[in-house]
Image: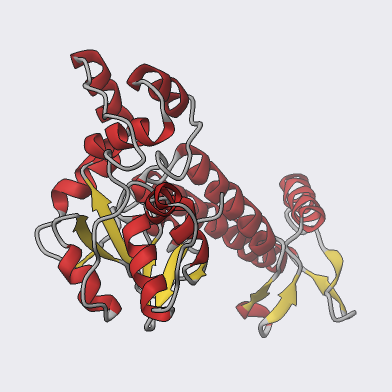
Amino acid sequence: MNLKYYNYNDTDIALIGKSGSSAIGKAITLAIKPYYEVRGSEENVAKINNAPGVWQGIAPKTETPANPIIPVRDPVERFRSACAQDGRTAEEQLAKVEAGDFTLHTRPTSDWLTESCRLVKFPEHVDYIAAELGLDEIPAVNDSESNNGPKPDLTADELARVQAVYADDIALYESITEAGQAYTASPKAATDEAKATKIREFESARWREEISGTTVAALGDAFVHTDKETQSELGKALAFMVVDPLFEIDWRFPDGTIVRLEANNIKVVAQTVFTHVQATRTKFKEKVALVAAASTSAELAALTW
């Protein structure tokens, strides 16, 4: 189910079931089409005027909001209202939401949040909503007398379960102190999986740096390979020098130049190569420590090789 937002007068507002969506949709529609008329029997007119699908369906909408208004209703009251709207007992509705089977009426309000949204309580801040949309008022729609049954009373167990499912929404509702309050997202925790991914990223980066080559200052900044084959050849040369301290080798540099390296120069090249390799390992160790210390996903994302 794609998240939708009403769009009117360059203002976006989340279309959240059981949080004023029918009333807002009707007010917007009649502002655009003041001549709009529902025809039929008196009974049908009364029912359609309070039918959520009518106004939610025809009012203009967007799925890419800009600085939207998010109406936040008391989550427990919203759940009770959803039960009445859907014709379910609290237990029947709980079975669905606890299994993650949400509808427009029961989907957590926090799903509509964006980084630049504005929070309002519904219905407490309905006048603010009307003013932001450029409407004179937003009359109430969709009440229990016209097309909903009575809201169920919740047992202590049912209430606790509703509060568990909608814990984030409850915290969001309780955080609102004024209409239009800017929403500030809580930092997302850096998960073990994300940290493992970052470490693998650094492992690859370290390997690429290890084999990228380096220069030997003592030989006029001559460039040398630092791959595993080069490391192995230098290791064997150093080992042979234990037997013959005056051992020399003909060494081919990446530019094609072949130079006779005496023992001292072999040591210089080897030391330069192995120092380069060790530096990448030290750097990797430091990066792993930073990954371990990262507590939020933002901190983790900011770490680079």
Q: Residue 183 in the image: x percent, y percent?
A: 25, 62
Q: Is residue 305 at least partly visible in the picture?
A: no
Quick one: 85 or 201, which is closer to the camera? 85
User: How many numbered marks have been drawn onto this rendered protein structure?
Assistant: 0
* 258 lies above or below 72: below
Query: Looking at the rendering, which quadrant does residue 280 occupy?
Result: bottom right
Seen at 42% across and 80% down, the residue is 32
- Left or right: residue 91 versus residue 254 is left
The residue that appears at 15% across and 51% down in the rendered structure is 175
State the residue in front, 252 or 298: 298
Q: Residue at x 43, y 29 (%)?
A: 97
Q: Is residue 296 above or below residue 158?
A: below
Is residue 4 at all visible to an observer of this figure?
yes
Residue at 39% x, 64% y is: 25
Viewed as shown, does residue 262 lie left or right of 201?
Answer: right
Residue 95: % across, % down: 44, 20
Q: Position of residue 116 (x, y in %)?
A: 33, 70
Q: Position of residue 139 (x, y in %)?
A: 24, 62
Residue at the front extreme? Answer: 41
Q: How is the image coloured?
A: secondary structure
Instruction: Determine the image quadrant of residue 112.
Output: bottom left
- Is residue 54 shown left or right of residue 115? right
Q: Is residue 219 above or below residue 298?
A: below
